Amino acid sequence: MAAQFGRRLRRGATSGAIVAAAVAALAASQGPGAIPPPTDNLSGDTAIGAGDATAPHGGGGAGGSATGDSPYYTDLPPLNPPKVPGVAPTAPQVPIVTGPAAAGIPATVLAAYQRAEAAIRASDPSCNLPWQLLAGIGKVESGQASGGRVDGNGTTLTPILGPALDGNGFALIQDTDDGAFDGDTTHDRALGPMQFIPSTWAVWGQDANGDGKKDPQNVYDAAQAAGMYLCAGGRNLAIKADLDKAILSYNRSTEYLTTVLNWFEYYGRGAHTVPDGTGQLPVDRSDRPAPGRPSVPVSPSSPASPSPRPSQDRPSPKPTDPATTPPSKPAEPTKPPTADPSRPDVGTPVEVPPTLRVARLKAGTATLTAVTGSTFAQAASVTAVDASGRPVAGVSVRFVLPATTDARFPAGATTVTVTSDARGVAEAPALRAGEKAASFTIRATVPGRSSLPAAELKATVEVRKADALTRVGDTALTAEPGARYADVTVESRLAGALAPGVTVTAVITDSATSDAQSADGPSFGKDAAGNPIRTKVLKTDAQGRLVVAGLVAGQKAGDYVLLLTAPGGGTAKVALKVTAPATTPPATPDPTEEPTTDPAPTSSTSPSTSPSTSPSAAASPTASASPSA
């Protein structure tokens, strides 16, 4: 253990001033060798700062550490820094393997660290979290997700699990999740690329990639959760004391602190991307040092020389009987290896991974057409080829749908990632059209190769068509003004087959030869302003039929037409008649009836008041001229 301890501390504690200055510098910039974080919602992730980035209340984890003080990798970075401090590197446009292998970080893992830094900078800028600190912890905890063995969405290809925390050399932590995360119903285990124990994840788990799950085995989710855990309690990681407390809260070991700080400082001097699955794997672990490893590192520039002394099996100084025991010969000196076999020489040629070999994505030639609400008959596909035009197998290809379409891949996805086969062909899963009839472009890219031009595939969603519309039934449609007509049923067909889901336009016209909307004819009711509605859009049902209901006769008598048209040429004309209302003749008066009105008044005396007056006396002109008077 003493030798192992010496190895782990071979570089000594990092200077507090240097580390604090490094954190402050990294907080203000992306740092040397940094690659800008993705801005295109890589892997279908939500926009930076828009995901689950709310710090939980309370702590998490047994004993006050995120990992339950689980074992960790103790490999230290090389003595020589990857780049000279102060010299700004040229940011590559394509990920290339360059510099020391130890400085390489798998592309998706690095993207997750940078995404977490950007998200936490947006939600908690005073923390000053640099992604290089997450990279240091990720290196020590899981060897950068086992060398970047993750899929296109950042989930580990196989679960990363620590040993059972059963108290035998580790903390004793009884099961807290019923085995939901770690599969162990007796004891807890540390989980995923950042090695959270289940009780810590239950409090700090994040959904950083917006897939609706908080998955400790997903490097995006785990990196953001780790960053928030480190920033807890209002820590400012640009201050050395807060930085040390944050790291020790992850694993309460001074050796762990020193190891993480060494990697943090190393990545701060420069890092580069390597393809997923090709990252350098660590060897030594705190609970099981690798056998035969030297306790003191061997400098690459000064390889150790073999010992001039032979082995301890020397001939005995006292001669023996040659007949019984021949003299032993000195053993050949054993030459220790001059290079660490677990760390491949940077200068050794390596096979170029498929992601870097691909020079172009050739769009497939299939015609991508579907009608609304149906599945495309052909799949979107591209072929990955190298600079010589030969197919490249094993290339991850991401297909992305634009926001302008409501077409979707299975499970409603707008982004899918597939791998090219032996022919170099990457074929997207079945695409289903939505209800929007329009053309759109599917983009195919290689994750991590931002400079490689995207392949564009044109797709078209067409409206459903009918070449024939036929009325069901022939009952005459007649109504008086304001009365409703009987419902009209129409059947649509395309090439003789029933055509469901077809959009049909219904218009009231003045005659069978006109397609202009009538100004006086029947209507489909009135709008909110009280105006008659004489044009309506309908859709056929699953049996290819539609029902025109609610037709109301207008106030003007006459003959009109219900004109029905569909994409594809289907037409139907239904006659509508508005009849004039029946008129009522005026009533003839009865001669025996008394007049209903009083006669005009006269100046003559009412007969009832002068019954004795004789008509002749009253009218006699000589009554007053008699001589005898």
Image (cartoon, rainbow, N blue to C red):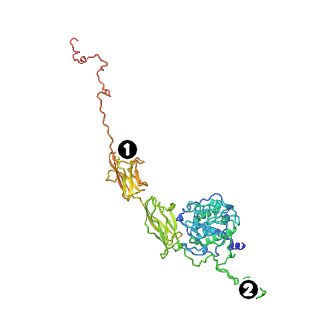
Instruction: Judge by depth and name the residue closer to the eye, 376 or 342.
Output: 376
Q: Is residue 114 left or right of residue 322?
A: left
Position of 107 relative to 214 (above/below): below
Instruction: Judge by depth and name the residue closer to the eye, 401 or 86.
Output: 401
Residue 57 pos. (x, y %): 64, 57
Asked if the residue under mark 1 is in contact with the one under mark 2, i.e. CB atoms within 8 Å, the reply is no
Residue 181, label in figure: none
Residue 483, label in figure: 1
Identify the residue at horizontal 69%, vertical 68% (top origin).
254
Instruction: Judge by depth and name the residue closer to the eye, 203 or 237.
Output: 203
What is the three-letter code of the residue carrying label 2? Answer: Ser
Residue lying farthest top?
628
Identify the residue at horizontal 41%, vertical 53% (top origin).
545
Residue 367 pos. (x, y %): 43, 66
Q: Is residue 605 left or right of residue 93?
A: left
Q: Is residue 427 left or right of residue 287?
A: left
From mark 2 to mark 1, how far is it between C-alphas?
124 Å
Q: Residue 125's quadrant in the figure?
A: bottom right
What is the three-letter code of the residue carrying label 1? Answer: Ala
Mark 2: give few (<14), some (14-19) or many (20+) Cα within 10 Å.
few
The quadrant of the picture occupied by the C terminus is top left
Residue 236 pos. (x, y %): 64, 63
Residue 328, label in figure: 2
As helix, strand or loop, the secondary structure at mark 1 comes to loop
Question: Is residue 184 visible to us here?
Answer: yes
Residue 596 pos. (x, y %): 32, 28
Residue lying farthest front?
323
Q: Residue 30's quadrant in the figure?
A: bottom right
Count the labels in the image: 2
Q: Identify the mark nearer the N-term, 2 or 1.
A: 2
